[in-house]
Image (tube, rainbow, N blue to C red):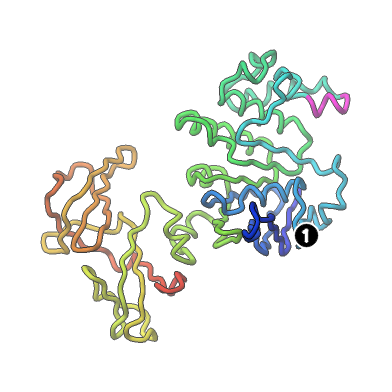
Amino acid sequence: MTAITFEHVTKRFPPGYPGAEAVLAVDNISFKIPQGDVIAILGPSGCGKSTLLRIAAGLMEPDSGTVYYDGIPLKNVPLQDRGIGMVFETGALMPHWETRRSVGFFLNLRHREHEVPERVARISQITGIGIEHLLDRRPHQLSGGEQQRVSVARALTRDMRLLLFDEPFANLDAKLRTQSRIELNRLLREYPVTALYVTHDQAEAVSLSKRIAIMRAGQFEQLGTYQQLYESPRNLFVAQFIGTPTINLFAGHVADGHWYGENFGGYPIRSDLANGTPVTLGIRPQYFSLVPDGVPGVVDNVVPHLSEKFQLVEVWLAKERWSLAVPLDAQIPLGSTIYCELNPDEALYFDSRTGVRIG
């Protein structure tokens, strides 16, 4: 296993057409992945996730800054000693190679082909799904899920120090994606390795990683456990990006040490904030409750979440819309008016101008 350190890493791409500006894909990022740790990078499309992964793999040189493997600059580590396994979104299998050759390529190259059957058998045993029956097939004879299983098996037959994933299950349907996550989780427990996992799927990030980095416009907005990001987001972007269903946001202002919005208000806030300071209140849907004499809202939509045992009720009043989670057995017709209140102890406050969390 290898500890990976990024030190002030920056990467720009030239403009795509004359007169355009260069694209800043990775912007002065510094962080460390300890040996055996798994970090997921979560963020919107185009935020620089895949670029950062390719820099970690040595497939792309940063414009400035340094990547270290166990304290040694990556460029000084010989290719054959890097021990990197990669799993891409498409599987990236050689189209004219049978699975047997793809999976065993690394070991065959080192004249250790006798180890391939044992590795394949062990991987099949751990996942609970055999791949022995796929060994004589070529990629065009494999389904998307089978190609990804072969791609993961190929990575795990290396003598790995670092395992990199670039949205490996993005093209799979929901059921197969869930199953693949379970299989990969078992494999990572059996073959502990330092790993960097790029995804846009929160469920994948939570189930496979110890920590999650939220990325936007080439920078890390926050790095921590899912619970830290969910309960203590650093800014509005993190608060909106993490959590399903998404957080409710209400525009408001400060008056005499209290927060006031259009429909909700009167909640204590930091006393050192000047009157009139614009502040956004954020609160998760589960922190609302139905009450006889609360704030009224006209029901616009009702979405049952059966596995989580609640229904998400979307309401509006004046210019504001919000969602609240209520029990499945509550009868809430569309178009009806319900009354609710929020729990101010669970409210999060953000500077409306900068988006930064107000403690």
Residue bearing the label numbered 1: 66
| SS state under label 1 | strand
Task: Give the image location of residue 191, x and y in percent.
Answer: 69, 37
What is the chief secondary structure element of the magenta stretch? helix
| Number of marks in picture | 1
Q: Which residues are magenta?
A: 105-111
Task: Indicate the position of residue 147 as horizontal and vertical percent values.
Answer: 62, 25
Q: Viewer-proximal residue, 251 or 235?
A: 251
Q: Is residue 105 visible?
A: yes
What residue sits 76% from the left and 62% below the top?
64
Residue 321: percent from left, percent from top: 25, 58
Quadrant for the C terminus in the image: bottom left
Is 217 displayed left or right of 336 in the figure?
right
Q: Quadrant of residue 318?
A: bottom left
**Residue under the image location 60 percent in, 36 percent down:** 89
Q: Residue at x 47, y 71 (%)?
A: 356
338 left or right, relative to 278: left
Residue extending furthest front? 18
Please name whichever residue, 347 or 9, is drawn nearer the observer in this view of the structure: 9
Does residue 24 appear in this view?
no
The correct choice, above or below, for 182 with respect to 288 in the image is above
Q: Residue 252, how many percent across, how many down?
A: 30, 73
Left/right of residue 147 with respect to residue 162 in the rendered view: left
User: Split into 4 quadrants, where in the image is the N terminus?
Assistant: top right
**Residue 229 in the figure: left or right of residue 165:** left
Q: Residues within 10 Å of mark 1 (few under 14, many from 20)?
A: many
Q: Amino acid at mark 1?
A: Thr
Which image quadrant is residue 158 in?
top right
